[in-house]
């Protein structure tokens, strides 16, 4: 039975559902970001546009992941934003290392190979980022979830000195 407290779910969605939502939210924000960087870069330097859009898209994606992907039921906390930003920086580093490695191995790699390397590194970083967000950033501790279940359950009232309630068998014999 699923426990509901204050209209919020007490459990996370399943891993497959959460991953599908992660891809949908993260991919959607990433796609929108790529267009936004191009548009903003027509007014300001590309490096500045990319940095600005990266910050905004990370904030937006973290909110979407908190509310929708991982079922946290509300806004992301500052701690969750900081941890999510850390995982985004790590993912960025993975793609940079992959591309720099390719550049070291081949002076002028084929554009198709560059795309394969970049997308592979990005996919690997995305799966790792999903795991970090699910298991650490938006995870509910077992004791916290158990406390929610215990708090939601009605406990029987007992009165000192009162006789114990009759069992169903005793009630049937008395009748």
Image (cartoon, grey):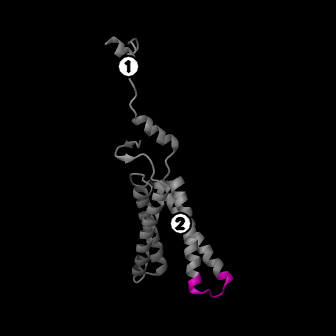
| x then y, percent, for residue 9 | 39, 47
User: In the image, is residue 50 above or below residue 90?
Assistant: below
Q: Which mark is residue 13?
A: none
In this rendering, position of residue 102 left or right of residue 166? right
Please indicate, yes or no, whether residue 116 appears anywhere in the rendered image.
yes
What residue sits right under mark 1 in the picture?
Answer: 168
Q: Residue at x 52, y 43 (%)?
A: 142
Q: Quadrant of residue 6?
A: top left
Outermost residue toward the left in this view: 175
Q: Residue at x 37, y 19 (%)?
A: 168
User: In the image, is residue 96 above or below residue 173?
Assistant: below
**Magenta residues?**
103-113
Q: Nearer the viewer, residue 63 or 150?
A: 150
Label 1: element kind: helix
Please indicate, yes or no, whether residue 167 appears anywhere in the rendered image.
no
User: In the image, is residue 141 above or below residue 33?
Assistant: above
Q: How packed is label 2: few (under 14 Cα within 10 Å), some, or many (20 or more)?
A: many
Q: Residue at x 54, y 62 (%)?
A: 129
Q: Quadrant of residue 97?
A: bottom right
Q: Nearer the viewer, residue 80 or 168?
A: 168
| x then y, percent, for residue 122 | 55, 71
Instruction: Compute the Cα span from label 2 to label 1.
Output: 58 Å
Q: How packed is label 1: few (under 14 Cα within 10 Å), some, or many (20 or more)?
A: few
Q: Quarter of the image containing the C terminus?
A: top left
User: Disc 2 vs disc 1: Cβ atoms closer than 8 Å?
Assistant: no
In this rendering, position of residue 106 left or right of residue 72? right
Q: Nearer the viewer, residue 42 or 106?
A: 106
What residue sits right under mark 2 in the picture?
Answer: 126
User: In the image, is residue 170 above or below residue 94?
Assistant: above
> Which circle's residue, 2 or 1, is located before the other in the chain?
2
Q: Quarter of the image containing the N terminus?
A: top left
| x then y, percent, for residue 8 | 37, 47
């Amino acid at each position: 039975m699923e426990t509901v407290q204050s209209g919020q779910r007490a459990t996370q969605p399943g891993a497959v559902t959460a991953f599908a939502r992660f891809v949908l939210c993260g991919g959607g924000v990433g796609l929108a970001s790529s267009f936004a960087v191009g548009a903003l870069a027509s007014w300001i330097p590309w490096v500045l546009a990319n940095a600005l859009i990266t910050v905004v898209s990370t904030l937006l994606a973290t909110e979407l992941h908190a509310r929708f992907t991982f079922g946290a039921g509300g806004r992301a906390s500052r701690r969750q934003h900081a941890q999510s930003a850390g995982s985004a920086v790590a993912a960025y580093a993975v793609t940079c290392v992959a591309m720099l490695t390719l550049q070291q191995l081949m002076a002028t790699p084929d554009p198709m190979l560059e795309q394969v390397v970049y997308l592979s590194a990005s996919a690997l970083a995305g799966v790792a980022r999903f795991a970090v967000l699910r298991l650490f950033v938006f995870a509910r501790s077992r004791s916290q979830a158990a406390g929610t279940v215990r708090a939601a359950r009605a406990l029987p009232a007992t009165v000192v000195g009162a006789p114990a309630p009759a069992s169903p068998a005793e009630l049937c014999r008395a009748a």
